[in-house]
Amino acid sequence: MKIHEYQAKAIMAKYGIAVPKGGVASTPAEARQIAESLGGRAVVKAQVHAGGRGKAGGVKVVSSAQEAEQVAARLLGSNLVTHQTGPEGVPVRKVLVEETAAIAKELYLSLTVDAASRGAVVIASEAGGMEIEEVAARSPEKIMRLAPHPVLGLYAFQARKVAYALNLKPELVRPAGDLLMNLQRLFVENDCSLVEINPLVITQDNRLVALDGKINFDDDADFRHKEWEQLRDPEQEDPLERQAATFGVNYVRLDGDVGCLVNGAGLAMATMDMVGEVGARPANFLDVGGGADDEKIKQAFGIILGDPRVKKVLVNVFGGILRCDAVARGVIAACKETGKNPQIIVRLLGTNADEGRKILRESGLKVDLVDTLHEAAAKLR
């Protein structure tokens, strides 16, 4: 789960991490008032769940309260398109108006979950203000990685080691170490999957300030964080992904045109790989799970058909607990309910597979029944 920058900074401030003064505005008039309270000169930032806002025109430095109002009027109610959004962009409903900072140096600092080590990892770099992927590609020597202890967390000497790696002045080593310790505590106590400050700036008066902030929560921990619901912004989420979540379907929308309905995450990944191998592009990851019934299959298939980019659909099911006849009935019901019938390529194996194939053959739908992934691939070419 992602949250907005202003929400992330509010949490960081509770953990003793310095952030710029400012406020969030929902109207141009509110933006003007906040800018006036900051002396006129300010930064106006569109609040969206996407990076690359600056390059897309979503971050503007203004020199007066009137200009802040004008920039806010342009941003609020618009859709911001960045390299991390689709061509439709994401809606801007709020802007963050903050004081400007006299920057001496920009740094990068984050904690995230590392799949390779199966634990948290600290990532730090002197090359702040840039996308960390770009830094990793061009100057990997500028990135430091350090793994906190999985039980005891980050030690003070490790935090200072990171500070030294950032080539900070001696008087900033301890404050930087304390900041990182606070960041690690925030990461653990809030069940985060990512906490990122980019840039973490050293101001000309020698202070460490989080000029930007990003926090992502681990969705699997939402049962013990009821406060997260108030931080959620459904408008920033993909509507199909949001719809899938309400039905308990694991769905991630991608940018291809081949819809995929599969049971089991491993089989779903293998299916997507196969789609890519033949030169096609999957439109989604979708795992209906092992215990889906007719209704859940109908809802899942309806979500796939709700993506206007989908031209073909591949159903690849190995039935165990999930019965193949239930898959067939769910697919047919979704097509009838939506009135859509793209080319559907179906591979059914396992429980009630013969019955499922029979149901599909007699349905009148455009269905290609195959026995192997190789046959399915041939239909996608």
Image (cartoon, rainbow, N blue to C red):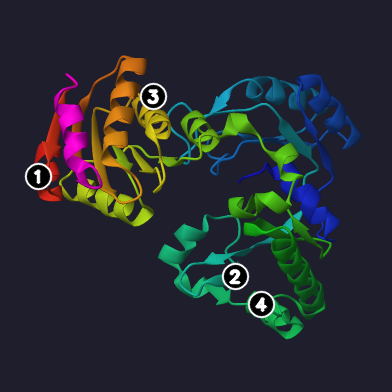
Q: Residues within 10 Å of mark 1 (few under 14, many from 20)?
A: some
Magenta includes 348?
A: yes
| Residues marked 4 and 3 touching at CB (< 8 Å) | no
Instruction: Please name the amino acid that badge 1 sits on.
Output: Glu
Q: Is residue 212 visible?
A: no
Q: Nearer the viewer, mark 4 or mark 3?
A: 3
Mark earlier in primary sequence (1, 3) = 3
Question: Which residue is the site of mark 4?
Answer: 162
Percent from the top left, x then y, of residue 136? Answer: 46, 65
Give the Cα separation between the discs numbered 4 and 2: 15 Å
- Looking at the rendering, the stretch of residues picked out in magenta corresponds to 347-364
Q: Nearer the viewer, mark 1 or mark 3?
A: 1
| Element on which disc 2 rests | strand
Instruction: Please name the amino acid that badge 3 sits on.
Output: Gly
**What residue is drawn where x is 80% and y is 29%?**
64
Q: Which label is found at residue 120? A: 2
Give the Cα separation between the discs numbered 1 and 3: 26 Å
Q: Above or below — where is 293 with respect to 177?
A: above
Instruction: Please name the amino acid that badge 2 sits on.
Output: Ala
| Image side of residue 3 versus residue 245, left or right | right
Question: Which residue is the site of mark 1?
Answer: 375
| Element on which disc 3 rests | loop
Q: Residues within 10 Å of mark 2 (few under 14, many from 20)?
A: many
Q: Which label is found at residue 90? A: none
Give the Cα separation between the discs numbered 4 and 3: 47 Å
